[in-house]
Image (cartoon, rainbow, N blue to C red):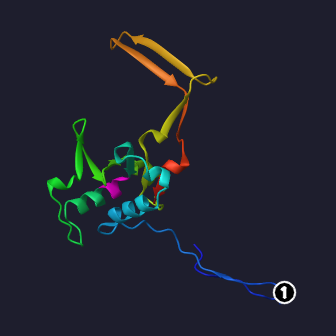
Amino acid sequence: PFTNITGANVTTNLSGSNATTVANTAPADLSADEALTKMRTLHKGANKVLKSIAATDKVMLVTDSVYENYLETLEGKSATGYTWTDSDGRNLLINGSTVLLFRGIPVINAGWDVSLDADFPTGRPHRIIYTEKTNLVLGVDGLSDDQTIEEWYDKNNQENRFRTQLRMGAQFVHGVLTAVAY
């Protein structure tokens, strides 16, 4: 909104300064191999406690943009010319779904992009959360006054119907088991 703000020292006892602001702009796409670079940096800079956990017990939760960029790197479509083969262990079949791996750690597309775009259209859309699998928990308050569970039978459609209202929230239990990049 403001292109340049200038302060003037009129009385000689005030300090003045310049501040330049730039209007919000849409976030840039990831460059070639940027997801791989960010995952390497995140992995290297993580807490020693997180590093000591077996790779199969950890996960990297990522946005669509990070997932696609990493997949392109693995497919060899990068500017640096990586070549991968099936024997490189770049993915794993878990419960019938292909899961990408980074150093043996599953890379999961968390599907946050729709919500991030709605809440932060000019924010930081590329996110990675590196954590231990059981560190993210969901808490449910089933004892509060606003908790209700309803059940009824709909004769027109011949269906049992349910409606539940309760409080819930997600939380990372241990901060040392979490590293984040955005």
Residue 156, x across and y down, in percent: 35, 12
Q: State the image quarter where residue 147 is shown.
A: top right
From the viewer's side, name the closer residue of 78 and 103: 103
Query: Magenta residues?
Result: 63-67
Residue at 42%, 65% (x, y): give it. Answer: 27
**Is residue 24 found left or right of 35 in the rendered image?**
right
From the viewer's side, name the closer residue of 159 and 176: 176
Question: According to the image, label 1 marks what residue?
Answer: 13
Q: Answer whether residue 65 is magenta in the image.
A: yes
Residue 96, x across and y down, in percent: 21, 37
Residue at 33%, 62% (x, y): give it. Answer: 36
Residue 169, x across and y down, in percent: 54, 37
Q: Answer whether residue 15 is magenta in the image.
A: no
Residue at 35%, 65% (x, y): give it. Answer: 37
Residue at 34%, 62% (x, y): give it. Answer: 35
From the viewer's side, name the closer residue of 168 and 33: 33
**Is residue 1 found left or right of 62 in the rendered image?**
right
* Quadrant in the picture for the N terminus: bottom right
101 in relation to 173, above or below? below
From the viewer's side, name the closer residue of 122 and 177: 177
**Is residue 138 found left or right of 13 in the rendered image?**
left
